[in-house]
Image: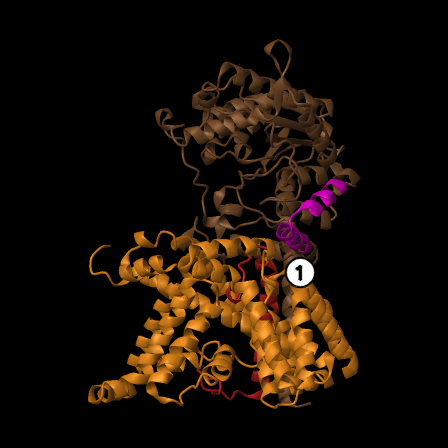
Amino acid sequence: MTTSRLSNWLLIAGIMTGFCAAAWQGNLASTYSKPDGFIRFHQRISPDAIFYPPYAMLESLALAHWQRGKTLVIIGGNSIMNGVGQPKDDVWSLRLQEQLGDRYVVVNLAFRGAYPTQGAALVAESLLLRGYPVIYVANTNPPAATGRAPGGASGYFYWQALYQHRLAAFPARDESIRRWLDSLPATERRQQDEERLGARLEAWFRQQSLWHHVGYRHFFTVWNFILARDFWVPHDRLPDTEPHAQPLADRFKNFLPEEMAITRGFSETMAVPGPGGSWQLEEGNRQRLGADIEASVVPLLRPHTLILLNKNAPYYLDRLSPAERARDVSVYAACAQIFRDHGIACEVAGDDFESADYIDRAHLSAEGGRKLAQLVARKLKEFPQP
Amino acid sequence: MIFNTYWFICFSAVFFPIYWFLFLPVLRRFWLLAGCAVFHFHFAGPAGVLPIIVIGLVAYLAGLTRWRFLCAAAIALSVAALGFYKYAQFLCVDLLGRLFPGTGALLERQLHTLHPIAAPLAISFFTFEFVHYLVEVYRGREPIRRPDDFALFAVHFPSLVAGPIKRYQDYLPDLRAGLAGVTVDDVAAGAQRIALGLVKKVVLADNLTLVINFYGPGFAGLSRGQAWLFLAALAARIVLDFSGYTDMAIGLSRLMGIRLPENFNYPYLAVSLQDFWQRWHISLTSWIRDYVYIPLGGNRHGLLRRLANGLFVFALCGLWHGPAWHFVLWGLWHGVGLVINFSYVTLLGPVGRALAGVFTRLPVLGWALTLLYVAFGWLMFFYEPAQAWAMAVKLFAFHGP
Amino acid sequence: MPPLRLLPKINLPVPLRLLGRFLLGLAIGVLFHYMLYRFSLPVQPFIYVAF
C-alpha cells in the first residue's frame, strides 16, 4: 500500500473514530448535562436564544431536584408559569417551594409558548411511569386548551421523548398526532418529518445533548440577536436578567386595542347565549376540549395533574362590557369543569388578582406570582400523597 | 435546505455504503439511478418531477435523431418552460403590465388559472444542461445514446439543485470511471470536501445570515463602521454559502468516484472584474460565454458590438437569478463594470494606458477596486433598488453617524 | 485556471503526515456530529437553491 493510500485510510478511520467518540460523549452528556443553580429556563437558555435544551436535560434536571421521600412538583406550561415578568429571585416557583415546605421539591420546566402537554408534561409522564412520586402543574386558557405534544418551538421534546422510549403507550395520542400530521400543508409536514428524524438520530448519537453541553459549559456557536456580540459566551456565565416590573402607572399602556381583542377572543368564539341572559359553552367547543383532553393527556398523568386557567389582567377585563365579562366568567368555569370531568384537577387563576399582580395582559408580577404560589400550594396539599 | 437536512443524512447513510459495496458497474449504475430518482422525487414532488421528465424526454429524443430542426425545437421548449414557470408572472405583470396595463391585467388573470404555485425544483439548472446538450448535438457532437446515461446526466443528485452546471462530454467519462471503481482516495477527498463545504455553509454563512437578517432592516440606524461591516458580511455570506454548497456537491459526487467541474477559484482575490467572472460561478460564466455571448458575436465584430453583447448577457445573467428588476440591475452593474474594464485602455488613449500600467504595477489597487465594486453589486442583488441605493448612500455619505 | 494554493506545501516526515491525516479525520468526524446538532436548529436554505 502506498503512503498516500494509507494516509487516506487513516483519514477515514479518523472520521469514524471522531464521530463515534463524539456520539459516546453525547451519550454521557445526556446523563449529566444540566444548568447549574437552576431556577427556570430563562430567555438566554431557551429557544428564543437558539438554545434548545434536549429532552434528556429536562429529565436530568427533574431527577437532580428530587430526593427520596419527597414529592416532585414539575411545573410546565407557558411563559406565565416560566415566570416571565418576575426577576430571578422572585420567580413564583420559588415562592411555591416555600409554601409547600420540605416534603415537596419544585422544578420549573415551563417554556415560553409551550402547551401544557409539551416538554415538562412528558417528563412527568416518564417519571410517573418509572414510579417516581410526581405532581404536574401547568397552565392554559380556554381557546388554547391542551394543545398538542408535537408542533411549535417546544414540539421537539415529544419526538425526542418518544424515540428515547420515555412515554407510556397511548394509542389515542398516536392517532391524534397521525391525523394532525396528515392534515399539515406540505412544507410544515416536511418540517415535522425533519424534527422527527432529528429526534430519532438524537436517540442514537446524542448530538443535541453533547453540543448544548458544550454551548453551556465551553463555547456557543450560533449567533442570535438576544446575545449579539456575546453569542459565543458559555451559557453558564449568562445570568437570568428578567427585569423588575415597570411602575404600575406605566403598565398596560401599549397596544390597548390589540390586547382588548385578544381578551375578548378568550371567550368570544367559545360561548353562546343561554337562558335568562346567561352564557354557556358552545357544544362544538365543549366536545373539542373533551376530545383534546382524551387524546393528549395520558390517563396515567391525569390524577397527578393540576391545570390552571389563567385569567387576563383586570385592566382589560374591566374594560369589557358586562355581558362580555359574564361570558368570560362562564367560559372559564365551564372549561375548568370539563378538565375536572376528565379526572384532572383544574383551577381558574386570577379571579381575585389585581392590576398590580400583572405586568401586562397575561404575565404576573412578583406580587401576582406570590398569589399564584399560594393558590397552587393550597390545591397541591389537597392532592393525595403519591 | 436539501443537503443540510436529516432526510439527506439518512439517504446518504443508506445510499453511499451500498454504492461502494456494489462491485459490478451495472449494479452501481442502477443504484445511482434509483438514488437520483428518490432524491429528485423527495425534494421536488410529483409536480416538480413531471415537467422535468417531459422536457428531458424531448431533449433526449431530439438529440438522438440529430436533426437540427428538432434540436432547435427542443431548445425552444426548454427555454419556453423556464420562461413559463419562472418568468411568466414577471413578464405579464412587471413588464407588459407597466407598458400596456389593460393587456397586462388580462394576462395576469389568465395566468392565475394556468400557472402552478411554484416552479419545478432547479428548473434553471435543468434548462442550462439541456440547452448545452442540445446545442452541442446541433453543432455536430455525438449525442448520448443510452437513456440511462442521459437520465444520470440530467438528475445526477449532487449537482441537481444548484450545479455546478455539467458538460455531458466531461461527465460521461467520469461517470463510467466512477461506476467502474471507487477508491479510498476518492472517498477521502470527497469527505474532506464535504467537511469544507459544511464549515463554510453551516458554521460561517448561516451565522452571517442571522446577523444580516437582524441588522438589515435597521441598516439606516447603523454607525458608518457597522454599515461597512454589514457590507463585508453580505459579501462573505454569499460566497461562503454558494461555494459551500458547491464543495458539498463536488464532495458528494467524489464519494462515488465522479468528478464535477469546479465552480469557484477564490473569487474575492480577483484583480479585475473580468478576473472575478473567471473565478465566480465558473460553470455559469462559461455556459453564458459558450451558449449566449459567442453566438451573439462575442468579441468578433468590433468594440461597440462587444460592449453591447457584454451588457446584454449580463442583464440576462442577472435575470436568470430571479424574475425581479433588482437582479437585472445587478447584472447590468456587472455588465457596465466589464464594459469599462474592456474599453478604458482603448477609449482613454494615453490616460488609459497609464492607468493600466498603474494597475499592473499595483495589483492590490485592482483587487481593492474589484472587491468594492462586487460588494456594492451584492446590495443590488439582495435588496430592492431604492433600498440598495439608500444603503450605498449611507456607506459613502460624509455626514450622519 | 488551476486552483490556487494559498500556502506552500510542507514536506513532513511520513509518520507525522500519517498522524496528521488521522487527526484531520478525527476533526472531520467530530464536525459531522456537530452538523447533526446544527441541522436541528432553524435551518437556513442555500441561497442558490432558490435560483
- Residue C42 visible? The answer is no
Residue extending furthest top?
Answer: A276
Quarter of the image with the C terminus of chain A in it: top right
Residue B225 percent location from the top left of the image = 29, 60
User: Is residue A194 one of those drawn in magenta?
Assistant: yes
Q: Quadrant of the N terminus of chain A?
A: bottom right
- x and y percent of residue B158 in the render? 62, 72
- Which residue in the structure is indicated by mark 1? B47
Identify the magenta region: A175-197
Residue A292 location (% of width, % of height): 70, 33
In the foreground, A87 or B160: B160
The tint of chain C in the picture is red
Please, is residue A210 above or below residue B274 in the view? above
Letter of the chain shown orange in the rendering: B
Residue type for callout 1: Ala
Q: Is residue B6 magenta?
A: no
Residue A141 position by quadrant:
top right
Disc 1 chain ID: B
Q: Nearer the viewer, residue B124 or B89?
A: B89
Residue at x 68% of width, y 48% of height: A159
Task: Label the magenta part by its dominant secondary structure.
Answer: helix
Is residue B180 among the parts visible in the rendering? yes
What residue lies at 51% left-to-right and 54% top-to-bottom? Answer: B106
Residue A335 locus on image (x, y percent): 65, 23
Is A247 left, or right, of B58 in this rendering? left
Q: Colour of chain A?
A: brown
